[in-house]
Amino acid sequence: MITATEIVQRIQFDEIVKQVQDLPSLPSVVMELLDSIDQEDVDIHVLARKVSHDQALTAKTLRFANSSFYGTPSKVTTIQQAITLLGVTNVRNLILAAALSGSFPENQCPGFSFKAFWRHAIATALCTKLLARHVHVNPDYAFTAGLLHDIGRLVLVTRFPTHYAQTLAYRKQHDCYLLDAERATLGIDHLIAGHALAVHWHFSEAMQYAIAGHHEPEKIESSLLVSLVHVANSIVHALDLAEEDDDLVPPVSLPAWNNLGLDEDIYQHVLRETALQFEQLDQVL
Amino acid sequence: MARRNHEITLDEAGPGMVLSDDLLDEHGQILLPAGAVLTETSIAGLRRREVDTVPIQGDEIVEDDAASVERHRIRLAQLFRNHREDDLATEILRQFVVKFRLGAS
């Protein structure tokens, strides 16, 4: 039985940075993909060839591409074919999702479900992208930010599994938000860990803010991207897409909500589409 | 009590079905009023007038749907168990999701 006073296993920021630096870097082709999101004239065929050299990445990407979400008429067997059928931006998002899930091999951390983690990440990516259209933010950029927003949690779970098991036990016992459990047990949280990783992986500043600020957007330099991820995160919890029994909807920040300024019709559409699109992708997760 | 009304083709229509809305011809004249019970004769009449589809009153929400609404209601209350009503933005989102899951109240 764990009580708050017994928990002294704090993680120092330096340890996080050290562990993050030990993480394998993302495949260089994925870094190129991330860098190319804002570019129109990227030579996707060169990228496709590079991706094809990574067996694991290719297999995972094609598995996503063959889900009913994309409803391709025939089975997609090469990255090149996927691009022809699904378009550059879809394939770019698929490769990214596949690369990220491959960067954090699953380990044993009692109480943590990698499956639920990725369900939440993908659903948030879809929802952020749907919201982004209405506030004129690049939808692929939004998708990526949604996909990455909780990446710090993977750093904590995979690099500090014993610590994090305590965090999860504390959360269960107190029925509180995971964020608060992290702060109470570790003295650090997934926002800090995610930010350290985003810096290490040379993500753009906007992406770093979106990862570091998605729970308390009012504390960070306010940007549309942070607000989008913040609101999408709560929507996905409210839609119950991760299917975690003791899930809790995080509070929505009023400044972030107002920053988007969207009306009910748009939200109803986003709720419907997020649930629908997620259902179609879910089967391959 | 909510009903699941739906549009069906005349071929699917049968005696005893109840119209959910007025059935109008191309000039806006009422052929059959809402609530009318279809008969073999009225269906034949509609066929002569080349009516393709008819709006049919559904059964009152069947037990399965009622059970699913109840399940969503309980689950939403659980997901929002930490929520305070004076938390404005969260309350708006909660209402949107309730409406999405349970339908307009």
Image (spheres, rainbow, N blue to C red):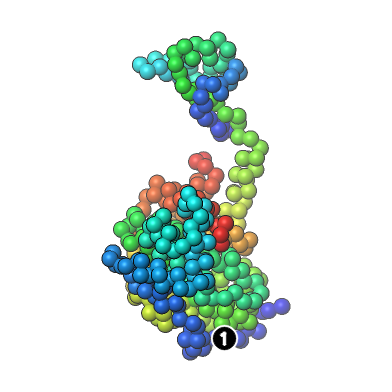
Q: Image check: B58 left or right of B29?
A: right
Q: Residue at x 32, y 67 (%)?
A: A43
Q: Image check: A88 left or right of A271?
A: left
- Quarter location, residue A156: bottom right
Horizontal and vertical percent position of residue A204 = 35, 75
- Quarter location, residue B81: bottom right
Foreground pick, A132 / A166: A132
Horizontal and vertical percent position of residue A64 = 50, 60
Q: Image check: B72 left or right of A217?
A: right
Horizontal and vertical percent position of residue B89 = 43, 58
Q: Residue furthest right?
A: A1
Chain at tag 1: A
Q: Is residue B21 visible?
A: no
Q: Which residue position is annotated with label 1? A: A10
Q: Residue at x 55, y 10 (%)?
A: B41
Q: Is residue B98 visible?
A: yes
- Mark 1 residue crowding within 10 angstroms, few (<14) / some (14–19) / many (20+): some
Foreground pick, A4 / A216: A216
The amino acid on which the numbered mark 1 sits, given as a three-letter code, is Arg
